[in-house]
Amino acid sequence: MIEIDAVDRRILRVLQTDARISNAELARRCNLSPAACFERVKRLREKKIITGYAAMIDPAQVGRDLLIFVEVLLDRTTGDVFEAFAEAVRTQPEVLECHMVAGGFDYLIKARVG
C-alpha cells in the first residue's frame, strides 16, 4: 500500500467528483499552487493511484435503466465448463461484473438491461 497524505486525499476526492476539472481549479479547491497540484497529480498517476479517467453515463438515457443480479448454477463445475462460461459472459455487453462465489450457486452476475 502506498502512503498518501491529506492533500492527496483531497485531490482524489475532487477528481472523483469531476475528473475534467482544470488543474488551476483543482489547485484552487485544494488550496495549492497550480504547479504543486500538477506535480501531485502527476505523482499519483506515476504511482498508479490514479489509474485512469472515465465518462459516467446515465443508464436510463441509453436504455439500460434496470440493474439486475443473476445467480448462476452450473450443471458441472469442471475447468472446461468454467472457461466456456467465462468466455460466454465476456461477450455480453450488458454484463458489468461476474463473480465466482461459494455457496448455493456458482456465479453472481451484475448486469444493466433495458
Image (spheres, helix red, strand yellow):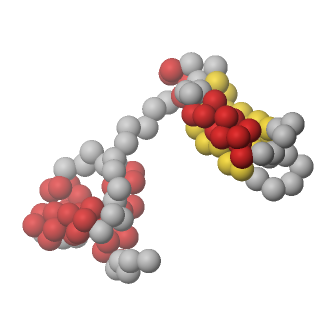
Residue shown at 69%/35% (left/top)? 85
* Left or right of 25 in this view: 79: right
Asked if one can make out residue 11 in the rendered structure from this viewpoint, the answer is no
Q: How many marks?
A: 0
Residue 48 placed where, x, y %? 33, 64
- 30 vs 76: above or below: below
- 114 vs 21: above or below: above
Res 41 quadrant in image: bottom left
Asked if one can make out residue 45 in the rendered structure from this viewpoint, the answer is yes
In front: 39, or 11? Answer: 39
Pick the quarter of the image with the N terminus.
Answer: bottom left
* Left or right of 43 in this view: 36: left
Residue 96 placed where, x, y %? 58, 38
In front: 21, or 77? Answer: 77
- Farthest right residue in view: 104
Residue 111 placed where, x, y %? 65, 33
- 37 vs 20: above or below: below
In front: 99, or 64? Answer: 99
Residue shown at 64%/20% (left/top)? 114
- 19 vs 68: above or below: below
Residue shown at 67%/28% (left/top)? 66
Residue 76 placed where, x, y %? 84, 40
* Left or right of 104 in this view: 85: left
In front: 94, or 38? Answer: 94
Res 5 quadrant in image: bottom left
